[in-house]
Image (cartoon, helix red, strand yellow):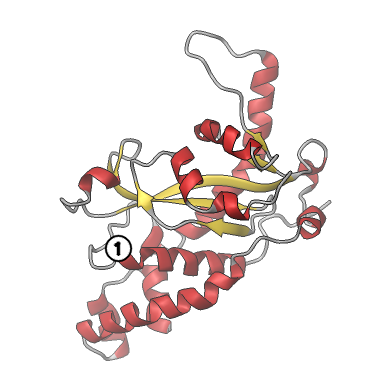
Amino acid sequence: MLICLQKNRLNETFKGLGYDYGVSESFCSKIFCKNVPLLCECLSTLILWPDKKIIRRRLPIYFSARYFNVQSIIDCFEIEKPGDPVNQTLSWSNYKKANTLKYFISATPDGYINFVSGGFGGRTSDAKITEMCGYLDVLPDGCSVMADRGFKGIAAMLEKKKCTLVRPPSVSANEKCTKQEVKLSKRIASLRIHIERTIRRIREYSFLKPHACINHRLVKYTDSVVKIVCGLVNLQPPLIKKFA
């Protein structure tokens, strides 16, 4: 367990870990590959969707006035990996200009992770990931979802569940934003920052840093590592100290 957790946190080489624990590099690698799925099975139980009443009770005060019905703030984060020729096309991210794995994440307004997807190729759009990752299956009917402009295409999906998408107004290259649109964008951005802070906690684990190149033999374990880390993040104190 210590070897798995230390690898996730510090992303040390198996040679270095083997030196620390007095075992060979290959044996250390076997320990990691065998036990990461077991740790994932345990810690992924900490990633769950709280009851609506619990979310309301822990709602940060600045959500209470206009966005009291928000149960989920969503975003995607990416992890770089080596450009394997077979998967290079699917994993290329135009945004990152590298081969990446892309994950969909949802958190409550106070920063508790209530959903995380498996990995997708970096070129997959945010809307497509939302449709395919299973998030809509666990999303409660009639709630509000907060997102950035990149999730414009999911509005129709949410309407089928009678949910509302809260996002900044669309920006046109030929039109100037009105004063009201600028205020709305700033207001939503100031609240959406909590999902960025949650992702920042995930990034504290070196295995999942933005530019952490993952060995091609470990790519199949990345989904498990992401869930382990999200479970550990949920054990940390809440992001928001004061509640309504």
Residue that carries the numbered disc 1 in the rendered image: 219
Q: Split into 4 quadrants, where in the image is the N terminus? A: bottom left
Indicate the secondary structure of the residue bearing disc 1.
Answer: helix
> Depth check: 237 or 66 in front?
66
Residue 46 % position (x, y): 60, 70
Q: Is residue 28 above or below residue 228?
A: below
Mark 1 Cα-neighbour bin, 10 Å: few <14, some 14–19, many ≥20: some
Q: Residue furthest front?
A: 160
Q: Is residue 33 above or below residue 181?
A: below
Residue 217 % position (x, y): 23, 67
Residue 99 horizontal side relative to residue 242, left or right:
left
Q: Would you identify the image quadrant in which residue 52 lies?
A: bottom right
Residue 55 % position (x, y): 75, 56
Residue type of the residue flagged with mark 1: Val
Residue at image position (67%, 53%) is: 108
Q: Would you identify the image quadrant in which residue 110 lies?
A: bottom right
Residue at image position (32%, 49%) is: 100
Residue 235 horizontal side relative to residue 77, left or right:
right
> Depth check: 34 or 77 in front?
34
Q: Is residue 198 above or below residue 153?
A: below
